[in-house]
Amino acid sequence: MNLIEDPWMPVRRTDGTREWITPERLSDPDIVAFDADRADFNGALMQFSIGLLQTTTPIESPTAWRSLLSAPPDAQSLRAWFAPVSDAFELYGDGPRFMQDLTILADSPEIYPVSALLIDSPADNTVKLNKDHFVKRGQMDELCPVCAATALFTLQTNAPGGGPGYRTSVRGGGPLTTILVSNSPKQLWHNLWLNILHRPLHLGHNGRTTNLDRHHRFPWTADFRVLQRDKQWEINPEQTHPDHVFWATPRRIRLDLENIAEGLCDLCGRESDTLIRKIAAKNYGLNYKGAWDHPQSPYYEDKGTWRALHPQSDGMGYRHWLAWVLGADEGKNKQRPARVVSHALEERRRQLGGALRLWAFGYDMDNMKARCWYESSLPLYGLGECASKQALSTVSSSVATWLAGAQQAAFCLRSAVKDAWFGGDARGDFSAVDAEFWHRTEAAFYVQLRQCIEAVRQDETSDPDTLESRQAWHRTLVVAALTLFDHTFVGTGPIERQKPRRIAEAHRQLVNSLHGKKMREALRLPAPEKPAAGRGKSVPAEA
């Protein structure tokens, strides 16, 4: 089976039917999306296709890129692009196999069930301790070659920690991926091509593409020790080809094609005469360290080093919009968007072809344990059509102010709920309070964001971040926080467990905090008017 020449990619057509295609049909106008049986597989297939196109595309200029966005290449053209690398994508055979270790069998590997390729499958210790309560053992004992190939790529691309010597991906374990896609249903090609950089921009100008052997791009085409002579060595991007970032193989794995079976695949349900049941695995694969910059991941700065972001247990939402779309610079908390996102918004603008959204996805990993798969779409409205970087800066400044106010309101609510429930310095997980607050205010945020972007698009010299807009956002935050306190978290508790004095004090403190100095500084609101002499204390002014 060859992943360039054989049909193995499940896709959904415009009429809703499913089909398995070869990569040369990615530009078919009747194909709208990938249609795998697992959410992480759909994300992996998107990354595989973008990586394949980026590796092989001959596009040398922004003009050439733009022409293929509106007029996709035909299957014959794509076949010609992919042909030079086709032999690196063989899944079977005695020689190099796609993303599989060439010499692992000579190093006495461990033998594992094929389910070990699935990131969320229970590990050996979980099974031994009988803790596989939610994802059960024995559910994925036999995989067809198509599902095995997709699982293999998914694991290598997202590789979490797996014990001593089981390396993580070039972006660390379970990275966050952000990809630009069209806001309205379009063909799959459009969404893939939005995330392709023209070749000189992707390769850079440091000479890394000259005098490099094939294994510098596709590491499985040679003994991994050619790149890493000792298990303690570290592989940095200067030692490889820029394309290597899409095809990194931190895990030493080889599919067992000797002990196969016939029947139905446990994952997709299709019949196959080559059901794979076992894999060989060995630790101390390629050890990726250094300034790796994957173009599909946002990064944060950590002590002068940029590291890929990872999904967290609090999920994804509008609080991430600014950092993932335009970047954030809040003192020590510096983040920058994925390179494909920043390039599209800063350089391509009106070339992008309509309203876009950001598709974000990835695993929330606790070392080697997958806690949750997250994915979300963040609308960009007409942000890509803003005429200048100054317009983007205006939007960024406005959103930064709103998010600062929302973060302060969430803190006030969480503190008040904790005080009402327990008082004192109670500890525990109060993430549910934050999650509900962000969810309650999300719709209002996007309404205000859309108005802001539309105003800047019509007149880039305008300043939509007016006092009235900040006051309106303040009212939204106040109403949400008080409603959640009164009707969701505190006021609805069993009366016999409530302490009215403590609740009243917590509520009073919440009201004061929501109108207090820190909130007003976060939203850049004026101080409330002082009461006239002889009229006593004023109540908090409405924003």
Image (cartoon, grey):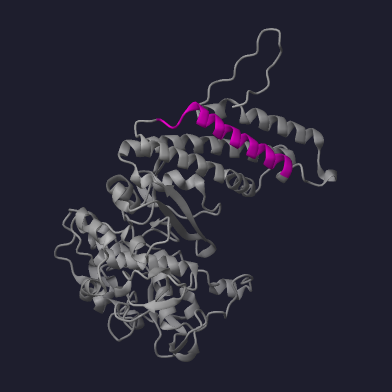
Kindly tell me whether residue 332 is visible in this rendering.
Answer: no
Q: Nearer the viewer, residue 89 or 213?
A: 89
Residue appearing at x 23%, y 63% in the figure: 241
Give x and y (percent) for residue 321: 46, 46
Quarter of the picture holding the N terminus: bottom left
Asked if residue 127 lies in the magenta stretch, the reply is no
Q: How many marks?
A: 0
Please say whether residue 14 is visible from this viewpoint.
yes
Which is more toward the observer, 38 or 100? 38
Q: Quadrant of the C terminus?
A: top right
| Image: magenta residue range | 463-487
Tell me where residue 423 sits by quadrant: top right
The residue nearer to you, when weighing 526 against 148, is 526
Q: Is residue 539 left or right of residue 287?
A: right
Percent from the top left, x then y, of residue 67? 23, 58
Give the quarter of the image for residue 105. Answer: bottom left
